[in-house]
Image (tube, helix red, strand yellow):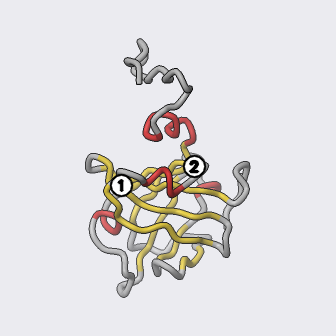
Amino acid sequence: MAGPTEHGLPTPTVTGDWSVSRIERIRFDHIGLVTSEKKPGERWVKATRVWVTSPRAHPFHIEWLRYEPDSPVTGPLRTQPHIAYRVADVHKAIRGQRLLLEPFDVGDGFVTVAFVDHEGVVVEFMQYADPDEEGWF
């Protein structure tokens, strides 16, 4: 890959490839914050035993997460905020990353998500069944 541009973004290679960590940052989806308080509009995610709110309902795209005591989620994903990005291929996006949570489906195939630790930051990659989706499960 060629060196960074004056704005810190990488220039594309001869084949036009960009690293996932650079190209996907333009596809911001939401910020997830952990809470112990019940929030209006919570939805249940069975796979991780967590209640979540729709970031589409928040003016700054905040998703609140409230874990049940018996949630299988541990570590930084359960205690730290995360930032979420939309990706075309969640399996490609997690390659070479420190995996916190394997890919799993939310909302009966609405979206496939995975969580990684990238330099101490919890990052969620989201592959929507419909890439133009603007709703929530």
Q: Is residue 132 above or below residue 18?
A: below
Quadrant position of the C terminus in the picture: bottom right
Residue 46 position within the rendered picture, expressed as x and y whole percent measured from the top left: 53, 82
- Label for residue 86? 2
Q: Residues within 10 Å of mark 2 (few under 14, many from 20)?
A: many
Circle 1 residue: 122
Element on which disc 2 rests: strand
Q: Is residue 119 above or below residue 43?
A: above
Q: Is residue 67 above or below residue 95?
A: below
- Check disc 1 and give the amino acid type: Val
Task: In this rendered view, identify the residue nearer to me: 69 or 74.
Answer: 74
Q: Residue at x 48, y 63 (%)?
A: 64
Q: Is residue 5 above or below residue 122?
A: above
- Check disc 2 and give the amino acid type: Arg
The part of the image, by quadrant, that contains residue 130 is bottom right
Residue 121 position within the rendered picture, expressed as x and y whole percent measured from the top left: 32, 50
Task: In this rendered view, identify the residue nearer to me: 88 or 120.
Answer: 88
Residue 17 position within the rendered picture, expressed as x and y whole percent measured from the top left: 52, 31
128 relative to 62 in the view: left or right: right
129 relative to 34 in the view: left or right: right
Q: Residue at x 29, y 63 (%)?
A: 76
Element on which disc 1 rests: strand
Q: Residues within 10 Å of mark 1 (few under 14, many from 20)?
A: many
Q: Residue at x 47, y 62 (%)?
A: 114
Q: Specify the farthest residue to the front.
A: 15
- Label for residue 67? none
68 relative to 23 in the view: left or right: left
Q: Specify the farthest residue to the bottom.
A: 70
Quadrant position of the N terminus in the picture: top left
Q: Residue at x 46, y 56 (%)?
A: 124
